[in-house]
Image (tube, rainbow, N blue to C red):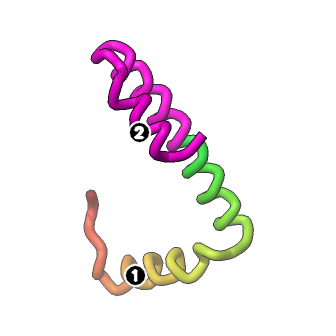
Amino acid sequence: MTIEDLEKAVAKLPPAELARFRAWFDEFDAAHFGQKIERDAKAGKLNRLAEQAIEDLRKGRAREL
């Protein structure tokens, strides 16, 4: 199956099924994104960003969200 096949199939879904698909895909995508972030964190790929954030906080260049 190609991306184009998927696009055509999704475009043909009735509204209720499209909503169901969207909810499923949101969960699927979030899980995969979370796994990627976890792998990157364990590999040290986020260390520089964390260090920069801590430095910004210490220097008063951060604010509460």
Instruction: Pick the quarter of the image with the N terminus.
Output: top right
Residue 24, image x, y percentages? 49, 27
Which residue position is annotated with label 1?
58
Identified at 65% across, 66% down, the residue is 41
Mark 2: which secondary structure? helix
Front-lying residue, 38 or 54: 38
In the image, is residue 44 part of the stretch drawn in magenta?
no
Indicate the amino acid at tag 1.
Arg
Residue 54 position within the rendered picture, expressed as x and y whole percent measured from the top left: 46, 77
Query: Which segment did they paint magenta?
Result: 1-29
Which residue is tagged 2?
Answer: 7
Quadrant (top left/top right/bottom left/bottom right) for the C terminus: bottom left
Residue at the image position 40 percent from the left and 81 percent from the top: 58
In the picture, measured across the screen, residue 45 lies left or right of residue 52, that is right
57, above or below 32, in the image: below
Label 2 packing within 10 angstroms: few (<14), some (14-19), many (20+) = few
Tag 1 or tag 2, which sits nearer the N-term? 2
